[in-house]
Image (cartoon, grey):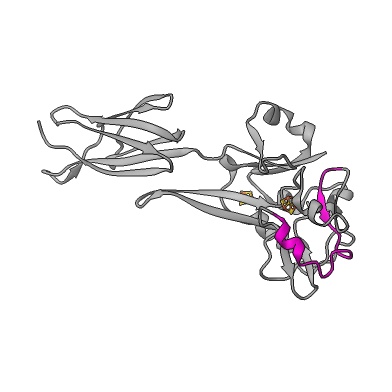
Amino acid sequence: MKVFLFDAARCNGCHNCQVACKDEHCGNDWMPYAAPQPDTGHFWMQVQEIEHGQAPKVRLEYRACMCNHCDDAACIKAAPDCVYRRDDGLVIIDPEKAKGRRDIVESCPHGRIFWNDELALPQKCTGCAHLIDAGQVPHCVDLCATGALRFGDESDFSDEISSGKAVAVDAGGGRVYCMNMPKLFVAGEVWDPFDDEIIEGACVHLVGEGVDRSELTDGFGDFWFKGLEPGNYQLEVSVSNYLGQSKQFRLDKSLNLGDFPLRRA
Ligand code: SF4
Ligand code: SF4
């Protein structure tokens, strides 16, 4: 069985994988797996940008999204006469049998099937099955220069999968795994309102949800705590010659706690 592995820690959002999919499929007929993809409107491979935090403390997360080639594929259940699974696990919409079957687009809970108006066809990622048959890798994987997108036999990734580091994108299991997805962060800025200056080197202590960490504010007076789980936290800011401050908060999404103006003691 084949597997895609997306490593968020290596992805720089270059979009090469998205362009590679267009390059391989637009105007190219790869029957019996895929009729040509239209030039616009289809994203069989799509790099999504997800913003975390609030300005000016914002981080962008990139995700390469495609058909998950689900183990329990809703599209196969909806149209078993038109959609099938290959021996290597890839799910294929048969371009001849699926002609006119717009209902197949709606069957995917992940929104990974697109309608081709001109050909009256539901279409999606085939895992570049035509290349795999030729002993190559999917074109998106080939053009990913950072190694964020990998492809191979499931046994090639057994360490990542068995350790739980890589998890299937579809909750029911599938051929696409992801790892190192970003957790939450909390950030803020410490400054002196009397001098109208940021305070570098202030001690910020965060406690909660298995975390007990301290950081010093940087040259911008900023602090960042990354890799946090959702939950309840308490944060304390202290620096000599100033009155400290503390804040309790609940973290459900990444949070910019804003300014901590410290008054002199
Ligand atoms: S992601 Fe959607 S199109 Fe792909 S196998 Fe799963 S249900 Fe089918
Ligand atoms: S090509 Fe690789 S690094 Fe670039 S956006 Fe796609 S997955 Fe990320």
Q: Is residue 246 magenta?
A: no
| Picture residue at 66% right of the left edge, 53% below the top | 110
| Label total for image | 0
Give the percent coordinates (x, y) of residue 187: 35, 40
Coordinates of residue 141 in the picture (x, y in percent): 72, 48
- 231 up-or-down from 84: above or below: above
Specify the quadrant that holds the N terminus.
top right
Q: Is residue 54 shown left or right of residue 13?
A: left
Q: Main secondary structure of the magenta part?
A: loop
Q: Residue at x 69, y 31 (%)?
A: 161
Report the front residue among 143 and 118.
118
Relative to 200, residue 33 above or below: below
User: From what the image shows, is residue 263 above or below residue 203?
Assistant: below
Q: Residue 116 appears at what percent x and percent y?
A: 75, 70
Name the residue rendered at 79%, 55% in the picture.
78
Q: Nearer the viewer, residue 185 or 147?
A: 185
Q: In screen coordinates, is 260 left or right of 205?
A: left
Q: Measuring 65% from the left and 34% from the top, which residue is drawn there?
A: 166
Q: Which residues are magenta?
A: 88-108
Q: Is residue 166 left or right of residue 237?
A: right
- Magenta segment includes 106: yes
- State left or right for residue 38 relative to residue 79: left
Residue 203: percent from left, percent from top:
27, 29
Depicted 173 relative to depicted 215: above or below? below
Instruction: Quadrant for residue 245, please give it.
Output: top left
